[in-house]
Image: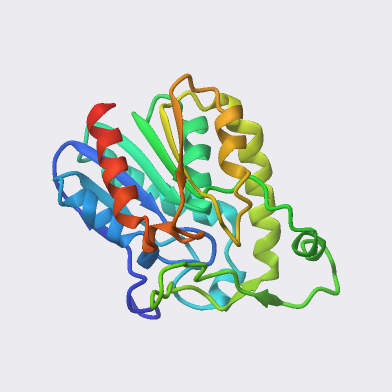
Amino acid sequence: MVGVMEGAEPFRMEGNEVGILVSHGFTGTTQSVRPLGEALARCDFTVAGPRLAGHGTSVQDMAASSASDWISSVEEDLVWLRERTTTLYFAGLSMGGMFALYFAAMYPDLFRGIIPINACVFLKNPDLARKAFDPEAPPTVPGVGSDIKARGVEELVYPEVPVPTIRELMALMRVTEDLLPAVETPTLIFQSLEDHVVPPENGPYIQEHLGSSRKQLVPLKNSYHVATLDNDADYIAEQTIRFILEN
């Protein structure tokens, strides 16, 4: 895959008939969720980690990508999983967690369960929102990656956010927020209590507004936003595996 950063490659691991899609987030790469994917694969689940369009290559590539492109990236791996498995789950970090909610609402009979991790349906960031449709906004703004509490751990992520993609993200969040009541899939919600990218209020808000009767909010007390690479990474994997086995 010419032009893809080392460590940002998509991953697919074949196992049993339980399939799990694991999605990274906005401006991030598969590096942030690969450890979770590998933990799931060790349980013999079939796992797919798509590289979202425009991610893991260059900021310029991402600037030319759209929300529809990112959705298509997820759909390609869902096709691959559906060809090999009989039961599907969706786990995702940040925007990837938002995609878990979005797809569960759009395809209500497709998933046995979803696992959003520090998912976002609102940012409460007026400075960022102002740039979405500002004709005088710069082409990029400083990045939001590597919000990790553990020392010596770095996220493979763009250092900048292309301003055109802010509009795409805002639209996705608004649509997903409106879709929450349509999510009737069992849901395991992970939420860091301290998060410098996504307001921690997202977790309780998502739980409250989901249509599902089976929804659990699990606080992460020792991680920041990129919890899948942080101090609670093993805990997230353990609880996710338990959720899948018991659901």
Q: Quadrant of residue 201?
A: top right
* Closer-to-camera residue (192/15): 192
Up-down: is 5 above or below 167?
below
Q: Quadrant of the N terminus?
A: bottom left
Q: How many marks?
A: 0
Q: Is 22 displayed left or right of 72 in the figure?
A: left
Q: Is 75 displayed left or right of 146 in the figure?
A: left
Q: Which residue sits at x=63%, y=47%?
A: 172
Q: Quadrant of the C terminus?
A: top left
Which color scheme did the rendering employ for the protein? Answer: rainbow
* Closer-to-camera residue (74/24): 24
Q: Which residue sits at x=38%, y=78%?
A: 152
Question: Extreme top residue here?
Answer: 213
Q: Which residue sits at x=56%, y=28%?
A: 210
Residue 204, image x, y percentages = 58, 36
Q: Is 40 displayed left or right of 133 in the figure?
A: left
Residue 156, image x, y percentages = 43, 74
Up-down: is 151 above or below 105?
below
Up-down: is 158 above or below 199?
below
Residue 42, image x, y percentages = 15, 51
Q: Which residue sits at x=26%, y=36%?
A: 242
Residue 85, image x, y percentages = 21, 37
Q: Is 163 displayed left or right of 235 in the figure?
A: right
